[in-house]
Amino acid sequence: MKSLVIGGAGFVGGYLIKELINSGHEVYATCLENENIKESCTVKNLDITDKNAVLSLTGEISPECIYHLAAQSSVSLSWKNPQLTAEINVIGAINVLEAVRNLKNTRLIMIGSGEEYGFIRENACPLRESEPLNPGNIYAATKACQEMISKIYSRAYKTDIISVRAFNHSGAGQSDIFVISDFCRQIAEIEKNLRPPEISVGNLSAVRDFTDVRDVVRAYRLLAEKGISGKIYNVGRGKAVSIQYILDTAISFSEKDISVKKDPQKMRASDIPIIEPDVSEIFADTGWTAEISMEQTIQDTLDYWRNQICR
Ligand code: A2R
């Protein structure tokens, strides 16, 4: 299959490109001018806010499937710069939708977020795709908007689109603004005596659903191959755990005696107690289920930071 990954230089992009190459796909990928892609595929520069550039590049490549990962993906930046977030996540997504509409025989895997559910009803977990969306931040609202407009393109123009709501994912190479990477980085620094043996944490009682990024990109490929056009799929483990469990597991992988300190800066004003998806739709249509254990993801992320910090 000829595949195009838009936003290939991000955390998920590298893993997705590897997954597609290993599955025999012919892979093209895009990144911004100031970024680069290490994986061996055909790389093009593309800013998705440039409508003509999106139309011309996709027309030139004419892929059978486009994976749209490019985004302003930071929740905190979305509060600081809502205009930029909307320009990339909404206008950029419309440019990609227009391109796919023009191509006619291309499937689009539109990557959204579990954040779209937002302030969920009590006892709503596990969240089914039919659950109403109630986004709690600007990033989530732009992703919900991207999904709604995708639905309109599916219905009005019969464009072949699959929308994904990806829940927390993690793995080696992820930024340390995300919790597993943050804990693992701190532990690796403690092991190298770069900080006192004390790990700083936020709310440990929140219960969240984490999937290894390698499982997540396999889900995206299977949706491209077997997903049902027009549908929305949750992608997640379907088994949430507390942040306390993640912390305890990460600390147990170190020989150091590490204490825990609560950092008020890491507490969020309104943390929803539990967020867990129902993943029966993706299982029913593609057979996908998460295979890599949480413990393995934590171990691999810790080993990644140990290597990074050596240098
Ligand atoms: O923000 P940067 O400089 O890291 O670049 C990001 C890139 N990007 C763009 N690409 C093309 N045109 C733009 N105007 C534009 N603005 C930003 O998209 C980055 O290289 C990529 C997104 O990757 P990450 O931020 O690392 O997100 P990740 O974790 O790979 O998530 C992939 C997708 C996103 O749509 C998330 O919202 C969703 O999964 O959860």
Image (cartoon, rainbow, N blue to C red):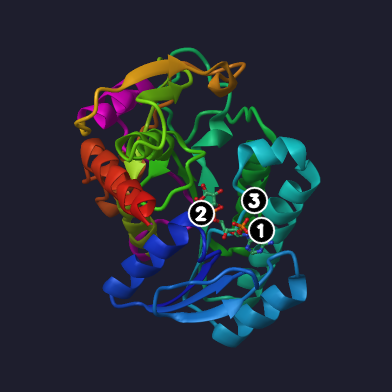
Q: Secondary structure at mark 3?
A: loop
Disc 1 marks a residue whose amino acid type is: Ala
Q: Nearer the viewer, mark 3 or mark 2?
A: 3
In the rendered image, residue 285 lying in the magenta stretch gets the answer: no
Q: CA distance from mark 1 to mark 3?
A: 11 Å
List the residue tagged with mark 1.
Answer: 93
Q: CA distance from mark 3 to mark 2?
A: 24 Å
In the picture shown, does residue 161 fall above or below 186?
Answer: below
Of residue 241 and residue 183, the one placed in the foreground of this image is: 183
Q: Is residue 235 visible?
A: no
The tag earlier along the polypeptide, 1 or 3, is 3
Q: Residue placed at 35% from the left, 65% from the top?
A: 225
The segment highlighted magenta reads 225-252
In the picture shown, does residue 226 fall above or below 103?
Answer: above
Could you say which quadrant of the image residue 74 lies in?
top right
Could you say which quadrant of the image residue 59 lies in?
bottom right
In the rendered image, residue 247 lying in the magenta stretch gets the answer: yes
Q: Residue placed at 45% from the left, 22% from the top?
A: 201
Q: Is residue 280 left or right of residue 92?
A: left
Report the disc number at residue 72: 3
Q: CA distance from mark 1 to mark 2?
A: 16 Å
List the residue tagged with mark 2.
Answer: 230
